[in-house]
Image: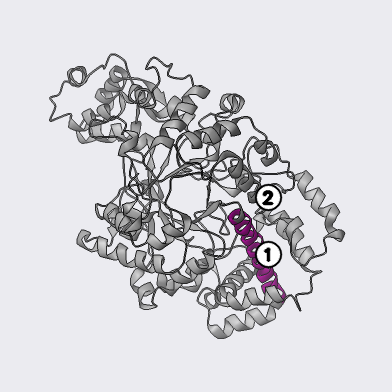
Amino acid sequence: MDKNLFYTSRTSEKWKRIGIKKRAGVALPLFSIHSKKSSGIGEIPDLKKMVDWCAITGLSIIQLLPLNEVGFDFSPYNAISTFALEPMYLSFDDLRKTDLRPFRKDIRGLKNKFLKDTLKVNYEIKKEKLNLLKKIYSTVDLNGIRNFEIFVNKNKQWLKYYSLFRILTDMHNGKDWSDWELKYAYISSMTAEKILRENENERNFYFWLQWQLYEQLRSVKKYASKKEILIMGDLPFLVSRNSADVWAYKNYFKLNLSSGAPPDMYFSKGQRWGMPPYNWENIETQNFVYIKQRLKYASNFYDMFRIDHFVGLFRIWTISKNEPVENAGYNGKFDPEEEYYWEGHGRKILEEMNDSSDMLPCAEDLGTVPECSDKVLKEFGITGIDVMRWEKNLNQEFKSAGSYRVNSAATVSTHDSSSLPAWWKYEAGTIDEFTFSKVCGSLNIRDGDYNYLLERLFEGNLHGRLSWKKEIRNVYVLLETLKMDYDQAREIVSLYLSSFSERNSFLKFIGMNESNPVNKITVAFIKKTLEKISETDSIFSIQLLMEYLYLDKDILRNYSGGDFRINSPGTVSGDNWSMRLPVSLEELLEMKINTDIKNLNLDSDRLIR
């Protein structure tokens, strides 16, 4: 691995501090893990057991999904604050300066009500937990708690508008701020101070919650540092429209627009996320203080930070707020529109981010990527993400391990994709039906002619994915069936070439027999895939926790369905952001596969001694 890129980059000092060496890591949402001590959902101190597991298996990075406080949909990427942490992740047992003896029965009752052996998070836990935390808080005397006072003084600005937002939300029975009375939606400083004075106890409750979260998460970082495990925080690029940030700093956002992503081969209608894009001109006039303060606070907890939707720093896809929701991101445009402006725009923001903290930045550079992105990543020595199933050469064969970017985190799956087993069973070798129908529409193939082609070309339709018939064995047969020449059928040919031989190409890539049954997923298949991703030139190999767990044959057999995933982009469902691991952390620490994972990291020279 050529390390010169990191030594000469703009983040060289940060790289030297963590060590310029190959590493392996694990990615997980905190809500998915659980221990004997946690109450209905993963809690911050549970991460210490994850640190222990990493030490056992030779992993040296824990990449977390965002821990910011979530809104109604419980999506970690639709936070109601870019500062405040999610209070349902608090551990009762680790609360500072509290007497829990009067509440032991209530805590036991809460743990029993929200059982640990379910595969989905019951988010009623948040309301129940907050109610109990309010009872506990009512017995606390904040006077004389020196660390609490220091915390409040250091973070007064964001704590003030966050707590005010929470108080006003409660006053309006949970309504969005845009539906509040005008005097509260567009509040004056005099009214704000008056409400905070009149609701001093509620204000201090939110201060106390955030202090407790600060102390617990900071303790995890200290524990991880002692064991030489790095913590990577995921900082949401955007923030919910109904958030303390947007309410307090409306001029930092373009409220007439919604952020999203343009159509691509995976999301043929594009995506519409709902969060408003930033008004960077106004943020810049304030010397980027909003961005700097966020990163400064996050550095209390993380060694590294993931820049969510990195390509959005250059330009972001925007959709009018009035566009029908069913059109998703189809009718949008980039902001800024002028391509010549993108590189300078993104570099300026990135410079401010890089200079704002000692954390090493890492990038999520997926989606429709502008040409300037890779150039800027190399200049700064920042890792992007190389997703194995999408890394193909011009011949649509999977790229060799040596072709992966050195400045990347190689991964089998992402939190927004299906798992490796589900991809293999339901997606590999298929194309998206909506994309196919759209291409046919552009060729004026409709109604009966379209249905005829579906019948002649494809085996069937599963979850909106079309599988080619074996008889369509090459491009010539495809053109003959279509009754078109190559120039006419260029787009359909492209879809065919990218998918028809995908399964055989992947088996060849990981070194398995190409006669491997299509729907049969074995531990050997999982192991070969993990070995191949670990062999890549990427400085980091970071896999979702479940991908490691599929090395266990029972877990692979019972939990490899298409619905066992963290998130399905473009959908709003109770299945999103609710997946729980089928094993506890105590069980994880004792699993036989731990030796296999350690050997995997040893053989690929990713074991940090």
Whether residue 238 is visible, yes or no, is: no
- Relative to 569, is 138 on the left or the right? right
Q: Give above or below for 486 relative to 586.
A: above
- Relative to 546, is 369 on the left or the right? left
Q: Give above or below for 498 relative to 567.
A: above
Residue 205 magenta-highlighted = yes
Q: Residues within 10 Å of mark 2 (few under 14, many from 20)?
A: few
Residue 435 percent location from the top left of the image: 31, 35
Residue 124 percent location from the top left of the image: 68, 50
> Looking at the image, which residue sits at the far bottom?
190
| SS at mark 2 in the image | helix
| SS at mark 1 in the image | helix
Residue type marked 1: Gln
Residue 332 percent location from the top left of the image: 30, 53
Q: Quadrant of residue 503?
A: top left
Given residues 406 and 266, the one toward you in this image is 406
Q: CA distance from mark 1 to mark 2?
A: 21 Å
Instruction: Quickly name the residue at label 1.
Output: 212
Marked residue nearer the N-terminal end (1 or 2): 2
Q: For the stretch drawn in magenta, what is the main secondary structure?
A: helix
Given residues 587 and 436, the one toward you in this image is 587
Picture residue at 26% right of the left edge, 52% below the top: 370
Picture residue at 51% right of the left edge, 58% below the top: 303
Instruction: Quickly name the residue at label 2.
Output: 124
- Relative to 196, is 296 on the left or the right? left
Q: Quadrant of residue 278?
A: bottom left
Residue type marked 2: Glu
Range of magenta residues: 201-225
Contact flag, marks 1 and 2 (Cβ < 8 Å): no
Q: Nearer the viewer, mark 1 or mark 2?
A: 1
